[in-house]
Amino acid sequence: MIDQAYELLMGGNFEDAVKAFSNCLSLEPQEARIYRGRGVAYFQLKRWKLAITDFEKARQLDYEEPSSWMGLAMSFVMDSKIYEAIDVYEKLLARKPRFIRAHIQLALLYYRLGIISKGHHQLDIALNSGSTLTERKRIEDLKNEQLALDKKRYYRPDFQALREQNQAGSFSFLKEFTKLFGKHS
């Protein structure tokens, strides 16, 4: 029955796949593969919250399976819960530090947030984690694409440096101000 549900899923019959996976759950409510499959079907139907629920359940039932983590994180992204997705990727990578797809997806999220250095760092880790030639090409393409965008981008100022500069400037202003008042009093 599970195989039939996956056939529906692979055939693009997502509504029917949801029904088939739901029927399977009535017989085997503790089977992670069923929740994962239904999560994928919900994802394809753009029902992000239902996909999140199913991927979370699949992850609870089979904590070592990275595809449940990836589905959960991607569902969070699609539901505009970027920081929750980052948290999932970081926890997955703490458990499986050489899982290249997670590094790539996390890098893309960092780029999306404008945290470019962290994105580059994730791609560097992916490059040094035994990536295949295809993965290396994709990683290098992503990094080069981001570098090209960086050249065209106006950067936000470094607020910490500006704050320090302001504080240093305000001290010199205070000295000058004190000198002026000292002369006039």
Image (cartoon, rainbow, N blue to C red):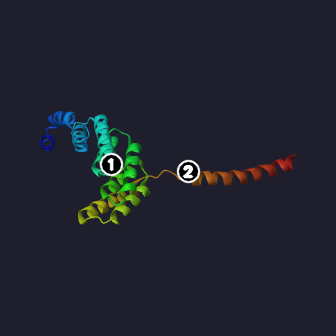
Whether residue 39 is situated above or below residue 168 in the rendered picture:
above
Residue extending furthest toward the right: 185
Q: Residues within 10 Å of mark 1 (few under 14, many from 20)?
A: some
User: Nearer the N terminus, badge 2 or badge 1?
Assistant: 1
Q: Quadrant of residue 56?
A: top left
Q: Residue at x 38, y 58 (%)?
A: 122
Q: Residue at x 31, y 59 (%)?
A: 100
**Amino acid type, mark 2:** Phe
Whether residue 164 is situated above or below residue 1 in the rendered picture:
below
Badge 1 marks a residue whose secondary structure is: loop
Please state, as top left, top right, bottom left or bottom right, where the N terminus lies in the image.
top left
Spatial CA distance of label 2 from label 1 is: 41 Å
The x and y percentages for residue 47 are 27, 35
Residue linked to disc 2:
159
Residue linked to disc 1:
63
Number of the front mark, 2 or 1: 1
